[in-house]
Each structure stands twice: as C-alpha cells, then as structure tokens.
Image: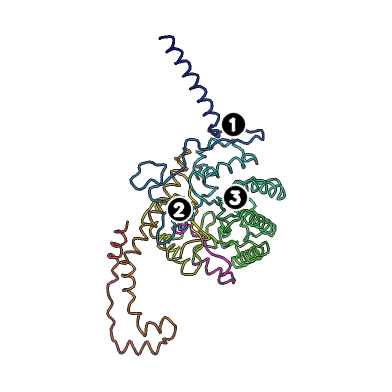
Amino acid sequence: MRERNVGKCLLFLLCLNVVSSVVIAAAPPTCPADTGSDCGSDSGEWEGEFFPGIPKIKYEGPSSKNPLSFKWYNAEEEILGEKMKDWMRFSVAFWHTFRGTGADPFGAPTKTWPWEDGTNSLAMAKRRLRANFEFLEKLGVERWCFHDRDIAPEGKTLEETNANLDEVVALAKELQGDKIHLLWGTAQLFLQPRYMHGAATSSELGVYAYAAAQVKKAMEVTHHLGGENYVFWGGREGYQSLLNTDMERELNHMARFMEAAVAYKKKIGFNGTLLIEPKPQEPTKHQYDWDAATSANFLRKYGLIGEFKLNIECNHATLAGHSCHHELETARINGLLGNIDANSGDPQIGWDTDQFLMDVAEATLVMQTVIKNGGLAPGGFNFDAKLRRESTDVEDLFIAHIAGMDTLAHGLRNAAKLIEDGSLSDLVRKRYQSFDSELGAAIESGKADFELLEKKALEWGEPKVPSGKQELAEMIFQSAL
C-alpha cells in the first residue's frame, strides 16, 4: 500500500513538472526592461514587458482603494450624449513621461528608469519608444505627443538628424498600428544653443533658416504619423531686454514664419490644426505669445486668424496672472480653443512646475468651457505634466496619469450635473435679463446710438442696480463638487 502511494506521489510530481513547463513556456516574457536583462532578440532589441508589475488599468469606481485603477474615468460611459473618452481625448506627453529626469534649477536628476542606459543613442531612442507604447496600452490612452528631438537624437548635421528622426518615426508608425493616434507633434526650438536668441525671432538669418528646416521636417513626420494637430511653442520667441531688441521686426519675422508654415501644411496635404501655445515668460523675460488675448491679436494683425487655434496650458495661464478658466474662455469666445495642456502650477512657486491637475473644482470649470465649446476634437487633453522630483518609482508614472485622468473625469461629471440642474445658468441668465428687451436687442445688434440711449436715460432716471449674487453662484457651484 505504501509503495503504491509513493508511486502515485511520484507520478503527480512528474505531471506537475510537465504542466509547469508548459505554462512557463507559453507565458510572455516578463523580465524587467533594464539594461542588464537577458531578454534580447537576435536584433538586440528587448522583447519583454517594460512594466511587468503593472496590470492594464481598469475602472473600479469611486469606492475603490486600488491606486492602479480609475475611480471617475470610465472610458465608454456616456455623459451628455458623448462617451467619456471622446470628451477627453487624453494624450501622454513623451517628453515629460519618458525624458523627464527630475532635475530642477538647483539639483541634478533623480530619475533613471530601468530601461535607460545613460545614452542618447538611436538604439536607446527606439527602446524608449517601445516603453511609451506599452505605457499607453496599459493606461488605456489612445493618443500621444512628442517633440522631434525628444524621440530621436540630434546628429552632427541636419541630414544625419533627419535620418535619425526618420528611423524612429518608422518604428513609431509600426507601433501605432490602427489603435494609437498622434494627437500632435512639434519641433523643439529652445534647448539647443543655436536658439538662444530665438528661432523665428532670432537676430541671425542662419538660425531662422535652420528653424524653418526643422519645422518643415517635424511637420512632415507629424503628417506621416497621422497627426491631428501641430503645435508651435515659442519658448525663446521673445526678449530679455528691449534695449537691444527690434520688437517690431521680430514680430514681423515670426508672422512670416507662421505664414510659411501654413503654406507648407497645405502643400503637403496636412489637414491637421496648427496650434499656438501661449506662455508669458520662462525661459525669456517676455514671450511674444504672452496669453490667449495677445496671441489672438497677433493672429488678427497678420491675417492668420483662420489658420491657427490655441493650445491652452493651465500652468501658463497662472504665470500670465490669469486662471485657466479665463484663458479657456478667452480662447473659446474667439473661436480659437483647439487643445488643452492639462497641468497646474503651485501658487507658492513662481515658475512653470508642470504638475498634474488634481484640483477637482478647477477641473469642473475647465470642463464647463469644454462642454460649451462642443468638445475639443481634433484636439484633446495632453498631460504636459511631470512627476515631482521626489517621485522616483516606475509605478508613479501610472499613478500620476490615473489621478490626472480621474480629476478631469470628475470635473466632467460635475459640469454635467450643473448643466442638468440649470440653477447656475439660470442665475447668469437672470443677471442679464434687462438686455432681453427691445432696446437690449438694438444694442446687441449695433442699432442703438448715443442719442437713443440718452433719451432712454432721461426717461427712466436713476437705474436700479440688482445684486450680482456671487455668493449664491459659488454655493451652487460648490454643491456640485
């Protein structure tokens, strides 16, 4: 009897070993994508997971305590007749997510991701790109954005640089497939020393020409990747001192540059939207596209108003002394709201901190404007935001994006509640109801002159001015949060 039991045990262990071998052989590679891992293919490219400990992020609802889950963002859920993913059109910023090092003006980098080898080689660029697309897939985000020099290294010549970019873009095209889309591309015209005086506003003709060549190439690859937009952020397009600056000439040069971009867009058949991203200063003392109103004025002055829209960044709004809501409304009422860089700044810090938006009240105001605008397509919400210097775990990349997505989704739900309730919009309507009259209609249609208005003022006498009900408006707004 004992010999029979021993035999059964040996047979069981043998079967268990066979099953384990089959399971292990069938499982995909999950060793970490670090530079010392032995998961390479014959081509030398790593073929396993970059985030082996991270599952695909799912919606679990507001009661979930799982940090790697959505509490408010439910992609397929309909809000006001649109799927949440279509209201949001979320995008991951390649530069902050995969090139961010944690460095600040006072300290060295604090982050080195496991897959980094410390170089800016072409092979490393491809490795980062693969990490990006795995990140998108696990996060459930369908769009991404890039600067040309962030995804591919600069070579010794423009020809070599363009060849590097072409090689990386070919891989990006393959990895995008038909599920991932490029929200927008752009040229990095601020980091390289040649752009210290600006790009389109440089005092040097050679730099102006080089910048044009770089934008030309960036527009081509954006078009090749099916980009929905192309962004101009003029980080160096401004001045440090007016004493050595011909501001009028620089503005004229920038306008000619934008005109050339419009012409080339049409020549290559690129149907995406051209976007200008306002920012008041940093790195220059004064940037020419200071805020939404300044940018709108620039576009009108040079006859470009129908060719561009604006990419509004919340942290840039606060640097300009505005709220994000103000900038979004300014862009919207001018017909220029094209995209939102979703981030925030710290009120105690005077620079562009690019934090993930975590304020639900601010997100609700943002989503009110987006709803009024009828959405953002072909734009979207790009997370132009970076981890804090002290956040150094790989999972922090996911947690930050999940929190940012949930904050905006929570804001969308709150904005929808305010619309469905109607109390706030009714308060605003009643505040202006005196204009819902014959004379009010004449004023708004431009048919009421001063003589007519003087006649009415004499007839009516001293006007009665009602309360603005600001506290009631704030109470209604807070009740939705």
Residue 298 is one of the magenta-drawn residues:
yes
Magenta residues, start to end: 293-319
The kind of residue on which mark 1 rests is Cys
Q: Are marks 2 and 1 in contact (CB under 8 Å)?
A: no
Query: Marks 3 and 1, Cα distance to the nearest angstrom?
Result: 35 Å
**Measured from the top left, where is residue 387 in percent x and y?**
46, 44
- At x 57%, y 53%, the residue is 182
Q: Nearer the viewer, mark 3 or mark 1?
A: 1
Q: Which numbered disc, 2 or 1, marks the residue closer to the eye?
A: 1
473 sits to left or right of 157? left
The quarter of the rendered structure image containing the N terminus is top left
In this view, the residue in front, 419 or 34, is 419
> Which tag is nearer the camera, tag 3 or tag 2?
2
Label 3, label 2: how many angstroms apart (C-alpha)?
A: 21 Å
Left or right, 70 with respect to 221, comes to left
Rendered image: mark on residue 191: 3
Depth check: 402 or 199 in front? 402
- Tell me if mark 3 has few (under 14), some (14-19) or many (20+) residues whose alpha carbon lies within 10 angstroms of its own: few
In this rendering, the answer to whether 351 lies above or below 390 is: below
Q: Locate residue 10, reporting x and y percent.
A: 47, 15
Q: Secondary structure at mark 2?
A: loop
Badge 2 amino acid: Asn
Image position of 415 with respect to 25: above or below = below
| Residue beneath disc 2 | 343
For label 1, the residue is 39
Q: Nearer the viewer, residue 115 or 378?
A: 378
Please give left or right for residue 405 compared with residue 227 in the image.
left
